[in-house]
Image (cartoon, grey):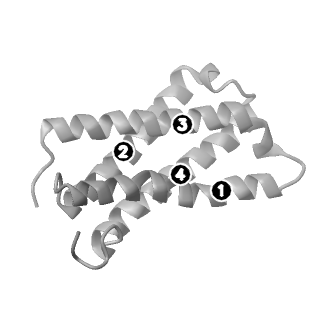
């Protein structure tokens, strides 16, 4: 397995920032629903993160495999890097600029738990996909 070169690492870091930013926007727009009286919406948000992450990560991996820009293990390492960058940015913002989330503390905590759930599913996709060959199950393009 090759190591990621600087260009591919920079691309992973960029997509990590985009990944975190999408989560930030979701928390800012729908944050009040994380603490809703009706518990269906929070459960729905937690459930929808799995297909959202699958689309966000699996499609680029398939495109990378299609154009042979990265081998499969390297592609999944990039997914892990994207997830960890999102988690790192989340921790930095919570500690130093919590006002960026524009929510009261209890709601922000629930939204951040959702964001960390998303990072966890991204890590699961990255590591399980590497072992299970999710992006290309037939072994070819």
Whether tag 1 and tag 4 are in contact, CB under 8 A, the answer is no
**Between tags 3 and 2, which lies in front?**
3
Viewer-proximal residue, 52 or 68? 68
Residue 46: image location, x then y, percent: 65, 56
Calculate the distance from the C-alpha at mark 1 to the C-alpha at mark 3: 15 Å
Labelled disc at residue 21: none
Mark 2, residue position: 82
Check the image and report above or below for 81 versus 7: below
Whether tag 4 and tag 3 are in contact, CB under 8 A, the answer is no
Residue 52: image location, x then y, percent: 54, 54
Dot 1 alpha-carbon crowd within 10 angstroms: few under 14, some 14 to 19, many 20 or more: some
Mark 1, residue position: 46
Calculate the distance from the C-alpha at mark 1 to the C-alpha at mark 4: 8 Å
Dot 4 alpha-carbon crowd within 10 angstroms: few under 14, some 14 to 19, many 20 or more: many
Residue 96: image location, x then y, percent: 52, 21
Labelled disc at residue 22: 3
**Between tags 4 and 3, which lies in front?**
3
Whether tag 1 and tag 3 are in contact, CB under 8 A, the answer is no
Q: Earlier in the sequence, mark 1 or mark 2?
A: 1
Q: Earlier in the sequence, mark 4 or mark 3?
A: 3
Dot 2 alpha-carbon crowd within 10 angstroms: few under 14, some 14 to 19, many 20 or more: many
Dot 3 alpha-carbon crowd within 10 angstroms: few under 14, some 14 to 19, many 20 or more: some
Element class at badge 3: helix
Check the image and report above or below for 20 versus 123: above
Q: Earlier in the sequence, mark 1 or mark 3?
A: 3
């Amino acid at each position: 397995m090759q190591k990621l070169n600087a260009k591919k690492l920079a691309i992973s870091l960029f997509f990590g920032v985009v990944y975190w930013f999408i989560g930030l926007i979701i928390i800012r727009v729908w944050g009040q629903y994380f603490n809703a009286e009706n518990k269906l919406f929070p459960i729905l948000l937690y459930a929808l993160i799995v297909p959202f992450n699958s689309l966000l990560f699996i499609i680029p991996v398939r495109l990378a495999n299609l154009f042979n820009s990265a081998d499969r293990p390297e592609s999944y390492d990039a997914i892990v890097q994207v997830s960890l960058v999102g988690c790192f940015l989340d921790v930095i913002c919570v500690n130093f600029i919590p006002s960026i989330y524009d929510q009261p503390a209890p709601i922000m905590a629930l939204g951040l738990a959702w964001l960390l759930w998303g990072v966890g599913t991204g890590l699961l996709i990255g590591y399980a996909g590497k072992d299970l060959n999710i992006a290309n199950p037939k072994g070819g393009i």
